[in-house]
Image: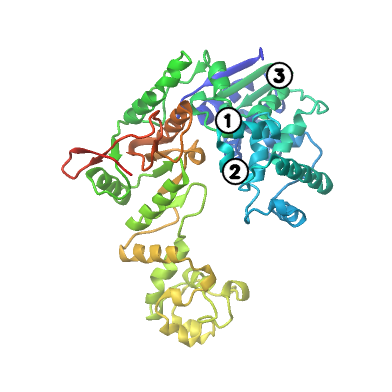
């Protein structure tokens, strides 16, 4: 499109928070805010942008509320949905109904997001292919063997049932929002400006939708980083974005990655820059140098592992463990539990909550007569079962409404007939908890934290997640497991590596592959190095 302008920004150059807000402010001098549309790929990013825009003095003067921006700063899906006849979203309950109607949908007890059939349909639509074309593509590449549905006739029949159900129940899947908007009968919006954040994540139908939205726009601005195109499995086209961004306006000043991580990332991505005959000016964040460490695995003791553990336990810095495949995620969890490191999966609650931890820690003191706050008493009560609580499961049958906010002893709670007398003999909180709420690995982890005298709260500083999940996040330190479970396109691997390491600000650790394949390498089998306690580097093959 003639009105398209691409803004290319490497990781941490302020694309979302700095450039977008500045650009929006400039546009307000030329256009009315109701004619400026700003779209992102996630609700989190859209919310952040909306908050920043609403803080602008120019917007505050106009007294524009959340409702005004609801469909003007939002996700691509939300915008398309706003232009269609309102329908409910196809959800897990709808999936269960389909399972009852047709046994072919009954693969395990999975959600819509996890179910292989829906993934297949999304994969086809995202690439702009028919199910048959996508099926043949998977078959040719050998990826079909990893799928649960290997019979095209079954898939086509399921697709027919899926469509019939949606039409009958008047529900719409996420991918339908874009497809329906792209229909020729949908009115083309009359706007002045369209801005798209993280544009490189757009798949084929999303790009068509964006082009349609921008049909009458005077300015069409895409902001992104083609080198971070890692959602190719969902239809994002790295080649397309590399091509259109070749002569793009560049953001140069790094605000995140220090010198070491910046240099490493530029080294990783260099073959792609060479392939597309361009280079990016990407300056490191000022005042940060950082170090690059290496680990053989999560088990082998070495100086670099001890540096990592020391930093985790004795600093306030944040840490991200990221990886390509599921086995690496399992190794992360084992590592955290082995060393008593509070952690959470990216986007999820902590593995153990502060409330759970403190109940197990303080209960032995409570039964010995030490008084505790009303809040802590409520926490105890919410987990306790009929073994210790007079009124059964407390959080469902009893309220502390009207109680004075002070400290109480167990004897007072027994006297008030809240706790049973026998509760004083149950010195381990595990004995009073409702069994259905107890997970063995959580309990073992809690007991280890207590033994190690860990000062624990809900604000965990250590998180883990696959590379696709952590894109867009920032941490002080990043630990990258380069294990791959299968061969993958070389340039795709480089982009994944680039995204992984660029999440970090200060230090990074490389964990060499524990399998045959290594992220970012053309060869199938590579040596790794064990860093000994003596400081030397020993070559070793990991099986």
- The quarter of the picture where residue 77 lies is top right
Residue at position x 64%, y 44% from top?
Answer: 149
Q: Which mark is residue 201?
A: 1
Find residue 6 and report its horizontal and vertical position in percent.
57, 18
Residue at position x 35%, y 28% from top?
Answer: 264
User: Of 266 and 522, which appears nearest the observer?
Assistant: 522
Query: Which mark is first along the chain, 2 or 3?
Result: 2
Quadrant in which the C terminus appears: top left
Label 2 sits on a secondary structure element that is: loop
Q: Which mark is residue 217?
A: 3
Q: Which mark is residue 540?
A: none
Kindly report the distance in space between the C-alpha atoms of the residues bearing marks 1 and 2: 24 Å
Kindly report the distance in space between the C-alpha atoms of the residues bearing marks 3 and 1: 22 Å
Find residue 65 and report its horizontal and vertical position in percent.
68, 38
- The quarter of the picture where residue 401 lies is bottom right
Is residue 189 visible in the rendered image? The answer is yes
Residue at position x 67%, y 21% from top?
Answer: 193
Q: Is residue 235 above or below residue 1?
A: below
């Amino acid at each position: 499109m003639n009105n398209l302008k691409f803004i290319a920004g490497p990781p941490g150059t302020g694309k979302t928070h700095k450039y977008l807000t500045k650009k929006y402010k400039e546009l307000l001098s030329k256009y009315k805010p109701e004619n400026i549309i700003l779209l992102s790929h996630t609700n989190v990013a859209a919310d952040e942008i909306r908050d920043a825009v609403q803080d602008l003095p120019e917007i505050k003067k106009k007294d524009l509320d959340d409702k005004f921006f609801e469909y003007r700063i939002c996700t691509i899906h939300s915008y398309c949905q706003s232009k269609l006849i309102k329908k409910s979203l196809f959800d897990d309950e709808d999936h269960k109904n389909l399972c009852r109607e047709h046994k072919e949908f009954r693969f395990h007890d999975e959600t819509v997001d996890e179910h292989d059939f829906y993934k297949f349909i999304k994969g086809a639509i995202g690439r702009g292919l028919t199910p048959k074309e996508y099926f043949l593509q998977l078959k040719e590449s050998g990826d079909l063997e990893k799928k649960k549905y290997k019979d095209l006739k079954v898939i086509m029949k399921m697709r027919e049932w899926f469509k019939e159900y949606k039409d009958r129940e008047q529900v719409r899947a996420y991918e339908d929002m874009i497809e329906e908007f792209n229909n020729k009968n949908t009115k083309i919006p009359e706007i002045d400006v369209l801005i798209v954040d993280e544009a490189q994540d757009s798949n084929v139908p999303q790009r068509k939708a964006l082009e349609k939205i921008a049909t009458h726009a005077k300015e069409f601005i895409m902001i992104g980083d083609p080198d971070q195109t890692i959602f190719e499995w969902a239809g994002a086209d790295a080649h397309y974005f590399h091509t259109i961004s070749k002569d793009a306006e560049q953001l140069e000043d790094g605000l995140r990655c220090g010198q070491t991580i910046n240099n490493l990332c530029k080294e990783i991505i260099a073959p792609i820059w060479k392939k597309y005959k361009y280079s990016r000016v990407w300056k490191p964040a000022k005042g940060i140098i950082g170090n690059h460490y290496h680990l053989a695995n999560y088990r082998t003791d070495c100086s670099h592992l001890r540096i990592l553990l020391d930093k985790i336990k004795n600093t306030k810095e944040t840490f991200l463990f990221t990886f390509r495949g599921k086995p690496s995620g399992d190794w992360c969890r084992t590592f955290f539990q082995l060393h008593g490191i509070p952690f959470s999966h990216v986007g999820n609650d902590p593995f153990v909550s502060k409330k759970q931890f403190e109940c197990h820690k303080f209960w032995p003191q409570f039964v010995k007569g030490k008084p505790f706050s009303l809040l802590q008493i409520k926490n105890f009560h919410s987990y306790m079962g009929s073994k210790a609580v007079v009124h059964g499961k407390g959080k469902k049958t009893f309220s502390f409404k009207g109680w004075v906010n002070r400290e109480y002893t167990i004897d007072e709670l027994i006297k008030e007939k809240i706790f049973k007398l026998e509760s004083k003999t149950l010195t381990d909180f595990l004995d009073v908890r409702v069994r259905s709420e107890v997970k063995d690995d959580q309990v073992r982890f809690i007991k280890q934290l207590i033994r190690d005298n860990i000062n624990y709260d809900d604000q965990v500083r250590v998180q883990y997640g696959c590379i696709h999940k952590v894109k867009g996040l920032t941490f002080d330190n990043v630990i990258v497991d380069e294990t791959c479970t299968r061969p993958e396109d070389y340039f795709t691997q480089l982009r994944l590596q680039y995204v992984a390491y660029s999440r970090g600000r200060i230090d990074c650790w490389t964990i060499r592959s524990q399998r045959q394949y290594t992220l970012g390498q053309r060869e199938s089998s590579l040596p790794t190095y064990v860093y000994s306690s003596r400081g030397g580097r020993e070559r070793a093959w990991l099986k």
